[in-house]
Amino acid sequence: MYSLELSLRYSPFPIAIQKKEFEDVKRIYEEIKNSMNEPLETSNLVELRCDKVQDKLIAVRAQEIISVQIYEKSSVAGGAKRPGFSLDID
């Protein structure tokens, strides 16, 4: 299972969906990247559907997306860090 996670402007919590196939999540990732590059005047609405939770539908304006990432959802639970970037300050 692959997860696609969006970070939104002015929102501390990300939005995520899961897809079974990497090709599906990669295609959506590319569509979102292209939408993010559009001029602000022609901002698109991005609709997402989750494979894991069948009734989960998300619609968000592309201009509100500030980052998008893909990661493989492993079945191993534990003390692993969450995917993404982290800042280690000692």
Image: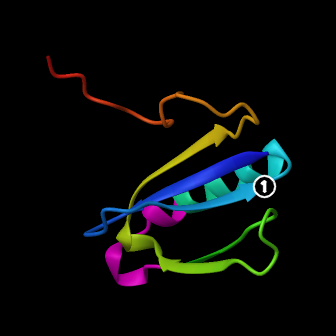
Whether residue 38 is in magenta: the answer is yes
Q: Residue at x 45, y 36 (%)?
A: 84
Q: Tell me where residue 38 appears, x and y as whole percent.
A: 43, 68
**Number of callouts:** 1
Q: Residue at x 35, y 83 (%)?
A: 41
Point out the residue furthest to the left here: 90
Whether residue 81 is in magenta: the answer is no
The 10 Å Cα crowd at callout 1, few under 14, some 14 to 19, many 20 or more, is many
Q: Tell me where residue 28 appears, x and y as whole percent.
A: 68, 58
The magenta stretch is: 34-45
* Disc 1 residue type (three-letter): Lys
Q: Tell me where residue 12 appears, x and y as whole percent.
A: 30, 62
Residue 85 vs residue 64, the one in the foreground:
85
Element under disc 1: strand
Point out the residue furthest to the front here: 78
Q: Is residue 32 visible?
A: yes
Quadrant in the picture for the C terminus: top left
The vertical placement of 18 against 72, above or below, is below
Q: Residue at x 33, y 76 (%)?
A: 40
- Would you name the residue on which mark 1 appears? 19
